Amino acid sequence: MKAHVTTRINQESVEFLCEPSETLLRVLRDNLGMTGTKEGCGSGDCGACSVVLDGELVCSCLVLGVEAQGASIETVEGVAASDELHVIQQKFLEHAALQCGVCTPGLIVATKALLAENPSPTEAEARYYLAGNLCRCTGYDKIIKAVMDSAATMREGA
Amino acid sequence: MSEARAFKHIGQRTIRPDGFDKVTGKANYGADLALPGMIWGAILRSPHAHANIRSINTERAEASSDVLAIATFQDFPSVNDAASAAGTLRKDLIDTAQNILAQDKVLYHGHAVAAVAARTEAAAEAALALIDVDYEVLSPVLSIDAAIAEDAPLLHPQLKTEGLVEPADSPSNIAARMELKKGDIAKGFAEADVIIERSYDTPTVHQGYIEPHATVVNFDHNAPSMIWCPTQGHFDVRARIAQLMNMELGQLKVVASEIGGGFGGKTTVYLEPVALILSKKAGRPVKMVMNREDVFRASGPASASQSTIKLGAKMDGTITAMQATLHYEAGAFKGSPMGPGCMTVFTPYDVEHMYVEGFDVVVNKPKVAAYRAPGAPQSEFAAEMAVNELAAKIGIDPIDLRLKNAAREGTQTIYGPKLKVVGLEACLKAAQQSEHYQSPIADGVGRGLSAGFWFNIGGQSSVIINLNPDGTGSIIEGSPDIGGSRASMQMMAAEVLGIAPGKLNPIVADTEHVAYNQTTGGSRTTFATGMAVIEAAESVVSQLKERAAALWNVTTEQVDFVDGVALNLAGEDSLTLAQICAAAEKTGGQISGTANINARGAGPSFAVHLCDIKVDPETGKTDVVRYTAIQDAGKAIHPSYVEGQFQGGAVQGIGWALNEEYVYNESGVMENAGFLDYRIPLASDLPAIETIIVEVPNSFHPFGVRGVGETGIVPPLAAVGTAVADAIQKPVSSLPCSPPKVLELIMAES
C-alpha cells in the first residue's frame, strides 16, 4: 500500500503518495516531475542527486520517500529566486565550471551546503567537501575556482 | 605561423547560452522525459561471461498480466530476412544486433538477452524473472594472452583473422591484423648506437560519463516514430535503427536530449532499438534507463592493451628506428581502435624508419566503444614511456630529445599524408619555458612528461541561420552540445554577422529539422560544424548586402558590410543588420542562410603534459602535486571551454594511469561495477590543472580552429607513469599505478 507523505520542498507544502520502498530521488523525479535532481549511480557514490534534507546534505537516492514526512527539503529547483540566479549559479557560469552539466545541479546544491557550513573554506576544504560529487568532464579545476569565487562574493555581500 | 587576425567575439569568455537551464535543473537529459501513457522497459542480462543459449522461453512472461511486451533477437527483422541470408548485410550490423540482444551466444557477463515492458519500472524488473533461459556455460576468455593461446576457447567459431599475409585457414580470437611501415626498419636499427625494447600494458577502463544511457521511444504507424536519447550523434542513431528495423530514415525522428557526458561512449545504440520494438508491440511510449552497474557491465568500455616498443637512436639523440607491436582487446565483437592506435603511436616523431603491427583481439568483455582519441592513449603511452627511458639512457633532456626528432610541417606520417603546419614544436618549447618545468622538483616527488597526438576529423555538418524581423536570430545545428559548443557556434556566427552573440539562439535540432550531421566526435564539432556556421553566416551577409543594395537602388558591389552594418560605398548611407531585417518584407521576404558541408583539413593536434607526483613509500599511494597541460588549439574560440577540454582530458588520463581498471574474477564477472570501487578521480584527489593554450592556426579553417576535445587524454598516461617511475626510481610498465602495484614495485629487488 502506498504511503501518504506531507513535506515541504523549496518552502512549499507538498503531498505525495509513494511505495514505502521508493527513494526520495524517485519521488522527486517520477512522482513530482522535479527532474533537476539527477541520478548518476543510485548508490550514493556520485552526488548527482544531492539535496538538503532538514539542513543536511544527502544523496536523495539513499533516502526513502517516506522519510520526507514532516521534513523540509531543498532541491536545485529552489536555489535560484524565480529568474535571478544565485551567486553560486552565476559563478559556475562565469568560470565555465560545467561542460555536459549533468553533475551541476548536485554540485550547486552541495556548494550551497558547504558555504552555509563554512563561509570561508580553504581550497583543500572545498575539494574534500565536494569529494562526494563526481564530475567526469571538467577535472574540477574550474568548479573549485567557481566555488572559491562564490565564497568570496557571498562574504562581501553578507 | 600565419598573422594573427583581430577578432571581436572570438577569444572572449562569454556565458554559454544553455547555461541558465543547466545550473537551475531545467535542462532535460535522457532520463528526464515522461510521456502520457508511458510504460517502462527492462533488460534481462546474462549471468555468464561466455555461454551458448540453448533456448529462451518467454511463455511465463507472456502469460503475465503485468507484461505488455517482450523483445528478443528474433524481433530484429533486418537480421533475420533475405538480406541477411544472402550475406548482403554488413557483418558489423549483425554484431550490433547481437550485442543489443544476444542471438545464440552470450559473450560477456551482463550481455542483454531479452527485454520486457510493464506499467512501472519495478514491475518490468520483476517480470524479468518470468523469462527462462537455458545456457550451456563455456570457459571465459579474459585477457589478450588467454585469447591468443593455441587452445583458447573461441568466441566466434567462424571468425578468421583479416589482414594476415597468408589468408587464415582456421578460426581465431584475433579478428584482424594490420601493418604500417616507413623506410627500412632493419636499416634503422643498424644505424643505432642505443637500442631499447620494452613491453607495457593498460587495463580495461570506462568512459565514466555521469549520466547513464536512457531513452524514451514512441512508435507511430502514421508519423515518424520518436526516439529521445542522450547521444553524441542522433543522425547515426537514426541510421542504425533504420538498418536494424528495416525502416526508412523518414520513418524515424531522433531527438537528442541534453547529454550528460559521452567521451565516445554515446556514439552507438544499446537501449533505443529495444525500446522501439517494445513500443511497437505494446502500442505505448516506452522508457528505458540503465543503472550504473549495467553501464559498467554492458556499455563502453575502452580497450585493454599490450604493447611492445623497440627504439634505436644515436648518441646525439637522433632517433633512427621506431617499432611497435600493439594488441588491443575488442571485447565481445571485433572492432577495437587498433587502427588509430597503430597510426598515432609514433606520429610525434619525424623518424625515417618505422614499423608498426597491430592486432584486434576478441575477449569475453563488453564490446568496446570509442573513448576520447580511441586507441591513441594506449599506444602512445607505450611509445612515450620508451622515449623517456631512451632520453635518460642517452643522458639528454626529454624535451630536447623530442625537439630534435619532432614531427613538423612536411613530416611523412606512417599512415599516409605529410603533415601540414602543426604545433608540436611550439608546445614542446612552451613546456620547456613553463614555470612548471623550470621549477625544482621537491624531495620524494617524481616528474614526468609526455607528448601526444590525435588526428581530429572534419566531415558533414549542416546549419541553418534564420534572422527575425528585429535582427535577432537562431542558429539551427545538428551537433549535440556535449561541452559548451552552442557557445562557440554563437560566437562564430556573431563574429561574421557583427552582432552580439546573445542576439543569436543556438538550437540543436532533431533529425527532421536540419539536414544530416555527423556525430559529435573526433573533435569535429567546433571545427566542422563551426565551418558550416561561418558559411551560413556568410550567406546571410551576402543576402544582407543584396537587400541593402535593393533599398538604396545600387549594385551589390557598391555595398560593404562591416561589424553588422551595411555601408553604401556610392553614398553616405548605412543600415544596421536589424534595419535591413525590418525592411525584409519590402526586399523579397525574410532572410536565412544555410550551409551543408563536408569539411576537409581538420588540423592535427599535438599536446605536451607535465606531471609531478609524490609517492608515499610505505603505502604506494600517489598524489599528483602539480600538473600542466599544453596544447595547440589552432585558435581558441572560447578559451574557457578550450581549457576545460585540456583539463578534463588530463584528469581522465590521470584516472586511467593511477586508479581505474575493470577487475574481473575468474568467471568473468566484473567485481567493481560501481563508482565506489571503480574509482574515477575526485576533487580531493587533484591539484589545479594548469593550462597553456598554444595557437598555431589551422589554415583549413577560416578562424584557424583545430579540434581540442580528444588530444588531452593522450599524454597523461606516460606523463604520470614516468613521474611515478621517477619518484620511486623503478621502471613502470603496467597501468594503473594503483597503490598495491606501486608498493610492489617499491618492494621489488632492484
Image (cartoon, coloured by chain):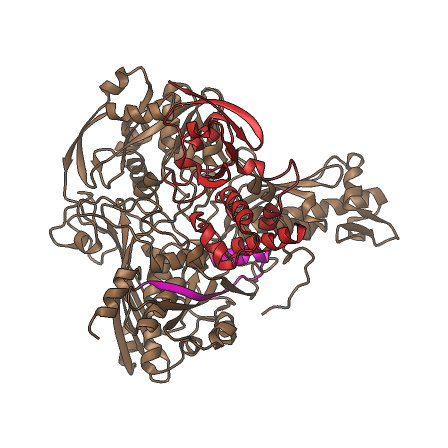
Q: Quadrant of the C terminus of chain B?
A: bottom left
User: Which residue is more in the foreground, A68 or B460?
Assistant: A68
Q: Quadrant of the N terminus of chain B?
A: bottom right
- Magenta-drawn segment: B621-647
Regarding residue B474, the answer to whether it shows in the image is yes
Whether residue B736 is situated above or below residue B36 in the rendered picture: below
**The image quarter in which residue B118 lies:** top left
Q: Work out which residue is located at the far right of the displayed protein and give it.
A: B572
Whether residue B342 is situated above or below residue A7 in the rendered picture: below
User: Which residue is more in the foreground, B254 or B613?
Assistant: B613
User: Which residue is more in the foreground, B711 or A89?
Assistant: A89
Q: Colour of chain B?
A: brown
**The image quarter in which residue B445 lies:** bottom left
- In the figure, is residue B207 to the left or right of B695? left
Residue B691 at x, y percent in the picture: 52, 64
Magenta stretch encompasses residue B243: no
Q: Work out which residue is located at the far bottom of the displayed protein and give it.
A: B316
Magenta stretch encompasses residue B635: yes
Residue ID at (57%, 64%): B697
Residue B29 at x, y percent in the picture: 49, 37
Whether residue B601 is situated above or below residue B228 in the rendered picture: below
**The image quarter in which residue A95 lies:** bottom right
Regarding residue B384, the answer to whether it shows in the image is no
- In the figure, is residue B742 to the left or right of B581? left
Chain identifier matching the red colour in the rendered picture: A
Residue B244 at x, y percent in the picture: 36, 33
Residue B495 at x, y percent in the picture: 68, 53
How many numbered dots are placed on residues in this image?
Answer: 0
Whether residue B667 is situated above or below residue B558 in the rendered picture: above
